[in-house]
Image (cartoon, helix red, strand yellow):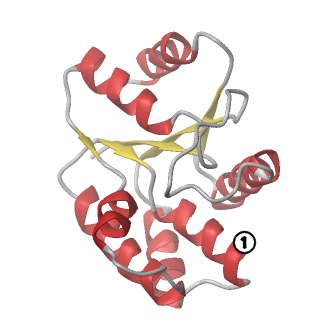
Amino acid sequence: MLKIIATGPESSGKTTLCKALSEHFNIPFSKEYAREFLTNLEREYNQNDLTKIAEGQFKSEHNFMLLDTDLITIKIWSNYKYGNCDKWIIEQIEKQKSEKRIYLLCKPDIPWEVDPQRENPNERVELFETHKQELENLGHTYFIVEGENRVETSISFLNQLI
């Protein structure tokens, strides 16, 4: 099954894009599991929690074509925040290289929106470039989502591929 994944740094429009694509193509989307996990966590998260988040995200992907983020974002965040990433996450990402996955890489060219689960308003461009490099290293097809007509250009790109 083809997977379409909205990815990118915090506050770059991933969820908004997924909602719009879900409505346009009349398909449900897998929500970012980290939001649910962190909302129910009654303490600060740690690196071990990222593996639990990755496991929940991975399980939630199976029944959906459209995903609001995936394990690559968790890997990038783990490396950024902790300097390394759990082996299981890396192994799953490697296995996914053989799947049909199209990434909509959201550029952080929209204003930062404050959210209690967001931590890093200042390195969004750096994290965007890290996402881009990771997608290139993995050999995934991706489209950079930017500018004012983000939804329309994403729909046009997907219509050409599907």
Image height of 26 relative to 7, above or below: above
Which residue shows up at 73% across the image and 83% down it? Answer: 83
The total of numbered circles placed on residues is 1
Dot 1: element: helix
- Left/right of residue 97 with respect to residue 119 in the rendered view: left
Q: Quadrant of the C terminus?
A: top left
At which x and y percent is residue 39? Answer: 33, 63
Disc 1 designates what residue? 80
Q: Residues within 10 Å of mark 1 (few under 14, many from 20)?
A: few
Which residue shows up at 70% across the image and 36% down it? Answer: 108
- Hey, what amino acid is under mark 1? Tyr
Quick one: 17 or 90, which is closer to the camera? 17
At which x and y percent is residue 1? Answer: 27, 46
At which x and y percent is residue 70? Answer: 44, 57
Image height of 67 relative to 78, above or below: above
Which residue shows up at 67% across the image and 27% down it? Answer: 110
- Left/right of residue 1 with respect to residue 54 in the rendered view: left
Which residue shows up at 66% across the image and 36% down it? Answer: 112
At which x and y percent is residue 140? Answer: 58, 49
Quick one: 84 or 133, which is closer to the camera? 84
